[in-house]
Amino acid sequence: MPAAPKPRSDARERILDAATRLFAQGGYDGTSLQSVAQAAGMRAPSLLYHFASKELLRDAVLDALLARWKDIVPRVLLAATTGRDRFDGVIGEVVAFFEQEPLRARLLLRESLDRPEEVQALIATHLAPWMSLLTEFIELGKAEGRIHADLDPPAYVSEVVLLILGHFALGGIASAALVEDLQERRLIELRRLCNAALYRPRPEHVA
């Protein structure tokens, strides 16, 4: 008995996943709709049913990458019970997202270089809501004396995002330059750097 056809929503996800990989590896200009269709396990007319042009497909790929943060980050911030939990929770979500598929980071980096104005507009649309929440958390921490008083919240968050993107998008360079695989240790150092730049050292208890 033949298998039941997969639902259209699943076909759309397969197209987006395939396009994410191929756009990241070969760039927008170097990727054809036919190659995306083949990678998604379908014919080109089926792909065009979901996305009428390559430009619309690229926009959908970027929207899918960025849209999830409008829901995930506020949920993490609200669920955390302490300020440090909030920050660690957000960093953990971002790291897990790119760790699951490092090519997502490469795609965002490539698109930022190829189409800076368009990507800036997308980031402003999708990331502005949780950027303001993180800024409020950082300002509260500064008022409580837990966070460095001279820290610039928007600039700090932007640099952390770029640091994480570079970690995953350029991870192959680190692997090629080093004899041993330091992926897990690099992630530990990434978190340590982010925390050290954010939090003031805890005072030592005097006996």
Image (spheres, grey):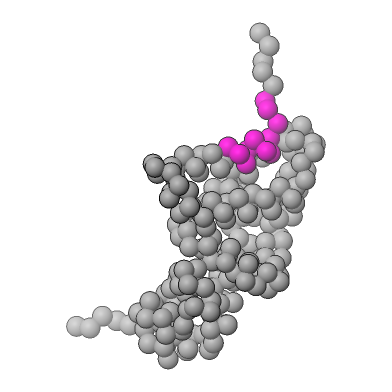
Position of 22 with respect to 5 (left or right) is right
Image x and y of residue 207, in percent: 66, 8
Is 61 placed above or below 83 here? below
Quadrant where the N terminus lies?
Answer: bottom left
Placement of 137 over or under 21, stated as above or below: above
Residue 94 located within the stretch drawn in magenta: no
Q: What residue occupies the far bottom of the structure in this picture?
A: 45
Q: Which residues are magenta?
A: 192-202
Determine the residue positioned at 50% across, 68% down.
24
Q: Is residue 120 above or below residue 191?
A: below
Q: Residue 63 at x, y = what percent?
A: 59, 71
Residue 10 in sight: no
Horizontal side, residue 22 vs residue 121: left or right = left
Q: Hey, which quadrant is residue 182 in on the image?
A: top left
Asked which quadrant contains residue 35, the reply is bottom left
How many marks on residues? 0
Residue 197 part of the magenta segment = yes
Query: How far across and how far down the image is residue 124, in percent?
Result: 71, 65
Q: Main secondary structure of the magenta part?
A: helix
On the image, the x and y values in percent for residue 36 come to 43, 79
Residue visible at 67% across and 65% down in the picture: 123
- 133 or 197, which is in the foreground? 197
On the question of residue 200 being in view, the answer is yes
Q: Residue at x 69, y 39 (%)?
A: 198
